[in-house]
Amino acid sequence: MKRLFLLAATCVLLAACGESGADGDSCTTAADCEADQCITGGSFPDGVCTPACDTDDNCAEGFSCISRSGGICLRDCSGTQECEDLRGGAWQCREESLEVGDGNRLVCIGD
């Protein structure tokens, strides 16, 4: 029984170690992300994996290119509960400026 538990625990740890964070996931360094970068501090509690962008076309579906840190992709949202469910209580749904154009978009961002 002890052997089975150790084998199961090892499998779980190995699976977790081999995965990189998808866009919008938490991170501490770029090595934690599939995207080109990990943005940390300030409005990004626990960091956020995000590719750099010039337009929404550079972002995955459901993400917008926001005018922060030279253009980053943040997850679209319709309400704060959605962001809290994905990332925790420090994240909320706020209107942010798009990188290109005069528009704004609701995205998940830290407070």
Image: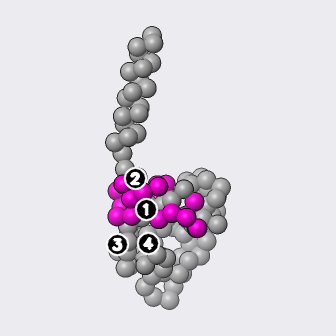
Q: Amino acid at mark 2?
A: Asp
- CB atoms of marks 2 and 1 within 8 Å: yes
Whether 39 is among the magenta residues is yes
How are the colours assigned in the image? Answer: one colour
Label 1 SS? strand
Which mark is first along the chain, 3 or 4? 3
Q: Quadrant of residue 43?
A: bottom right
- CA distance separating discs 2 and 1: 8 Å
Is 52 situated above or below 32?
A: below
Q: Nearer the viewer, mark 2 or mark 4?
A: 2
Q: Which residue is mark 2?
A: 32
Residue 76 or residue 68, whichever sits in front: 68
The tag on residue 58 is 3
Residue at 43% over, 77% down: 71
Question: Where in the figure is residue 16, as x and y percent of width and height?
Answer: 40, 39
Element under disc 4: strand
Numbered marks: total: 4
Q: Which residue is mark 4?
A: 72
In the rendered structure, are the residues bearing label 2 and label 4 in contact, judged by CB atoms less than 8 Å apart? Answer: no
Residue beneath the point at 45% across and 12% down: 2
Indicate the position of residue 37 as horizontal and vertical percent values.
Answer: 39, 64
Of marks 4 and 3, the one in the foreground: 4
Q: Is residue 6 left or right of residue 78?
A: left
Please report whichever mark, 2 or 3, sits nearer to the chain's N-terminal start.
Answer: 2
Residue density around tag 4, few if under 14, some if 14–19, many if 20 or more, within 10 Å: many
Please tell me whether residue 69 belongs to the stretch shown in magenta. no
